[in-house]
Image (cartoon, rainbow, N blue to C red):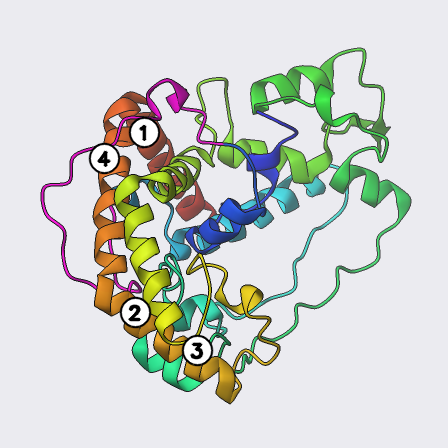
Amino acid sequence: MPRLRAAVTAVVAPACLVLLLSGCGGGSGGSGASDDKAAEPDVATTPVLLDSSGLTFPMDAYLVPAAQRQELQRAQNVLVDQCMRRYGFRYTTPKSPDSAATTTDVYGENGRRYGLSSPALAARYGYGSPPQQTPARAPRPATGSNESLVLDGPPDLDPSSLPGNLEEAEKARTSGKNTRAVNGVKIPVAGCSGEAGLRLYSPDAAAVDITFSQNLNAEANERSRQDSRVVEAIRKWSACMAQHGYHVASPMDVPSTLQLVDLSGSQAVTTATADVACKRQVNLVGVWYAVESAYQKGLIEKNAEVLKNFKDQQQARMRLADSLSG
């Protein structure tokens, strides 16, 4: 598990899936699937669909919902504070309203999974987003050198040498190699931020990487993009767009390919309306959804034991989070 990546940071949101596939994150789900990548799964039925915002997928049962992600972040903040108290400090985080409006709330977590697909939103906003009212988070309060050391650990940490779970971190903290101490107490290897993340997400060597199910989710989507049935549906969609005067190869790249500057302007709205109409005409969303769901089912079967452990550990995390909320 690399440098507390999954432990220190919040759980990856499903809405980040499109970004994961285009550069926000990297790698596959680590399921060793390259050996059977050429196989295309059977699809029993192909539903007729358009707006993808309300879709549910087989992998959803193993993804962490937004409400749980928020609760886990609050729990992590409490654990940081508990750790900081051992060294005579306190940790407080600026409050941010959970109900703040976001693009995800408007489009749904799958609203742009296959590109824009809502006729109503296309006609109103084009490829843009509604005006947001999300309050800015207050900056982190200034801290002294010792407090920063306790919170984040030494600034010259080698990421490759950091522990992958809490048991390893505690051994490293109490070993003779770790000589950093504040107020007579040795500090965690990656500070209280690292310890809190490991306590919540990777307490021991048996912990499944918190990004595992999300990576499988992204892997299924990437495989579906290469599937011959999806490729053919996209080809038909592209031909339909060409009939409207728009020469684009992918529904994910329309604004960039056509160099739309004002994503909510009249030109963007006209283009988006044609885009969604072509998706309806060739049933692009229905085909893609059926194919991607089939890939997800295959990955779930192949990784059944790990996913069961992941789900059990997520339930344990939520019990810990609940115990800290009081």
Q: Residue at x 82, y 44 (%)?
A: 148
* Residue 179 place in picture, x, y as percent: 85, 19
Q: What's drawn in magenta, residue-wise?
A: 28-57
Alpha-carbon span between mark 2 and mark 3: 11 Å
Residue furthest to the bottom in view is 266
Alpha-carbon span between mark 3 and mark 4: 35 Å
Tags 3 and 4 in contact by the CB under 8 Å rule? no
Of label 4 and label 2, which has the lower sequence position?
2
Q: Which mark is residue 298?
A: none
Residue type, mark 2 in image: Cys
Eyeballing the image, is 251 above or below 243?
A: above
Q: Residue at x 27, y 26 (%)?
A: 39
Residue type, mark 3 in image: Thr
Left/right placement of residue 242 relative to residue 152 reads left
Give neighbour class at mark 2: few <14, some 14-19, many 20+ (Cα, 10 Å).
Answer: many
* Residue 29 place in picture, x, y as percent: 44, 31
Tags 1 and 2 in contact by the CB under 8 Å rule? no
Of label 1 and label 3, which has the lower sequence position?
3
Residue underneath mark 1: 307
Give neighbour class at mark 3: few <14, some 14-19, many 20+ (Cα, 10 Å).
Answer: many
Residue type, mark 4 in image: Lys
Alpha-carbon span between mark 1 and mark 2: 37 Å
Residue underneath mark 4: 297
Residue type, mark 1 in image: Leu
Left/right placement of residue 117 relative to residue 208 reads left
In this view, the mark in front (3 or 4): 3
Residue underneath mark 2: 278
Alpha-carbon span between mark 4 and mark 1: 12 Å
Eyeballing the image, is 95 above or below 271?
A: above
Q: Could you tell me which secondary element the residue under label 4 belongs to?
A: helix
